[in-house]
Amino acid sequence: MARILIAEDDASMRQFLAMALEKAGHAVTLCENGMTALQTIESDPAYDLLLSDIVMPGIDGIELSRKAVAVVPTLKVMFITGFAAVAAENGAENDAKILSKPFHLKDLVDQVGQLLAA
């Protein structure tokens, strides 16, 4: 399926996301913050999707997405946040998908599939 890089500062949420996406057949790499995610994608740019929380210490998800897409122009981006309106107002890219917390695992897998197919 796809290679997905997850940037999420909450450990339980990272595991929740990874479990759902790996069960759907995706290869998942987990990063605990934006800086680690950026370093990961710079050292291995073969990712199809960046799945990122928006609010993280250091580099937030929006800044991470901009820098990651500069490294991998074909990278698709999905944000997971409890602050969807804030994300839209603060510069989330137009083609980035925003999934608002709370969500069901099926919704996550379905939206990832749709984004990857687009």
Image (cartoon, rainbow, N blue to C red):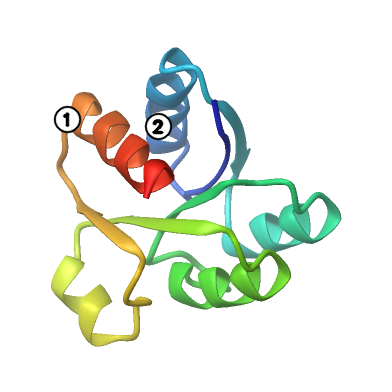
Residue 91 image position (x, y, % from top left): 34, 85
Vertical placement of residue 106 versus 63, above or below: above
Q: Is residue 118 left or right of residue 7?
A: left
> Where does label 1 land, which residue?
104
Image coordinates of residue 81 in percent, x first then y, are 27, 57
Mark 1, other Cα within 10 Å: few <14 / some 14–19 / many ≥20: few
Mark 1 / mark 2, whichever is N-terminal = 2
Residue positioned 15% across, 42% down in the render: 102
Identify the residue at horizontal 18%, vertical 48% (top origin): 101
Q: Secondary structure at mark 2?
A: helix
Residue where numbered disc 2 is placed: 17
Tell which residue pokes out farthest to the top in this image. Answer: 23
Which labelled disc corresponds to residue 54? none
**Structural distance between the alpha carbons of marks 1 and 2:** 10 Å
Residue appearing at x 21%, y 25% in the figure: 106
- Which quadrant: the N terminus? top right
Which kind of residue does numbered mark 1 sit on? His
Q: In the image, is residue 112 above or below residue 79?
A: above
Question: Farthest residue in the bottom direction?
Answer: 90
Answer with the quarter of the image where residue 43 lies.
bottom right
